[in-house]
Image (spheres, grey):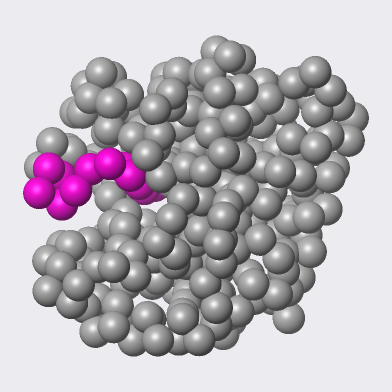
């Protein structure tokens, strides 16, 4: 089994959902983001989502947009993100890593080359926000050959027929965008999630990770129990950004994020 399958199967035996924290690569610099990445599993991360900095996002809210710009100013490239994953794999060969980004950098890199290099670096799955199912043939064959999961996105506005179409050949897990909006804004209620999840489960047997708008330990706990995982992104980025001085990391940066991550993990495991 893949790392993603293995991790979700293990958590199912434990009777709990997963916590998936997000970090933006190279934010505020390469060394700080790598230090944070390496420390996340011990702080409670079950899977880790790494954002690939991009200048023209369509789904990211102001907090993650600012993080992406800091990453780009620090020299982030798709190749450097893969280098970060390779460095992480030197000490951790079990925690699943999922890259989240946009199609333009992958297309510029070369779809076949990217899939091969990502798998060699230790990436397990990719989320391409602006690649609809109808355009997935650009990556699908290469990803499957390399053993990468292309994580499918669905939303509250996804119709039943569209759900079955999008999830027909999905692998890894399903990312449920729980609100109609950008990251770091509104939050879905427990009632909204309980209403949405059965509809998704009718279309797939894959685990469902719930993201967008999850910021507190209680929200993470609720999402990981109604679904199979909670994704926390903007809340962690806000904490990190609050420790920066003139855009640079301080001695408080990594500890502050890890302390917040530990609180989220404790809630998910409660």
Q: Viewed as shown, does residue 44 lie left or right of 158?
A: right
The x, y position of residue 70, in whole percent, is 61, 22
- Residue drawn at (60%, 79%) of the image: 222
- Residue drawn at (29%, 83%) of the image: 199
Inspect this view and state whether residue 231 appears.
no
Location of residue 7 with respect to 114 vertically, above or below: below
Inspect this view and state whether residue 111 appears.
yes
Location of residue 97 with respect to 191 vertically, above or below: above
Q: Quadrant of residue 71?
A: top right
The x, y position of residue 40, in whole percent, is 68, 48
Q: Quadrant of residue 162?
A: bottom left
Q: Single out the residue that lies furthest toward the right.
A: 251
Q: Viewed as shown, does residue 140 lie left or right of 7?
A: left
| Near-viewer residue (102 or 66) | 66
Is residue 269 shown in magenta? no
Of the 4 image quadrants, the one containing the C terminus is bottom right
Q: Viewed as shown, does residue 30 lie left or right of 109?
A: right
The x, y position of residue 2, in whole percent, is 36, 57
The x, y position of residue 113, in whole percent, is 24, 24
Q: Quadrant of residue 204?
A: bottom left
Q: How many marks?
A: 0
| Near-viewer residue (229 or 39) | 229
- Residue drawn at (19%, 48%) of the image: 132
- Residue drawn at (39%, 27%) of the image: 56
Of the 4 image quadrants, the one containing the N terminus is bottom left
Is residue 129 shown in magenta? yes
Q: Which residues are magenta?
A: 123-136
């Amino acid at each position: 089994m893949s790392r993603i399958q293995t991790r979700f199967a293990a958590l199912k035996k434990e009777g709990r959902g997963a916590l998936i924290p997000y970090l933006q690569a190279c934010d505020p610099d390469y060394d700080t983001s790598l230090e944070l990445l390496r420390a996340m599993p011990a702080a409670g991360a079950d899977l880790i989502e790494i954002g690939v900095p991009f200048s023209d996002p369509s789904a990211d809210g102001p907090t993650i947009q600012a993080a992406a710009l800091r990453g780009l100013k620090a020299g982030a490239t798709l190749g450097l993100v893969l280098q970060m994953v390779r460095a992480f794999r030197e000490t951790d060969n079990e925690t699943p890593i999922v890259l989240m980004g946009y199609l333009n950098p992958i297309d510029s890199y070369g779809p076949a080359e990217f899939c091969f290099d990502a798998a060699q670096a230790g990436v397990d799955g990719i989320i391409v926000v602006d690649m609809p199912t109808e355009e997935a043939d650009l990556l699908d064959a290469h990803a499957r050959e390399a053993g990468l999961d292309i994580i499918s996105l669905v939303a509250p506005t996804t119709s039943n027929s569209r759900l079955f179409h999008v999830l027909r050949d999905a692998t890894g897990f399903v990312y449920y965008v729980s609100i109609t909006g950008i990251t770091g804004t509104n939050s879905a209620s427990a009632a909204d999630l309980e209403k949405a999840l059965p509809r998704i489960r009718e279309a797939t047997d894959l685990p469902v990770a719930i993201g967008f708008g999850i910021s507190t330990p209680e929200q993470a706990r609720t999402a990981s129990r109604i679904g199979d995982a909670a994704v926390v992104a903007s809340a962690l980025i806000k904490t990190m950004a609050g420790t920066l001085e003139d855009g640079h990391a301080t001695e408080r940066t990594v500890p502050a994020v890890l302390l917040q991550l530990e609180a989220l993990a404790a809630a998910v495991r409660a």
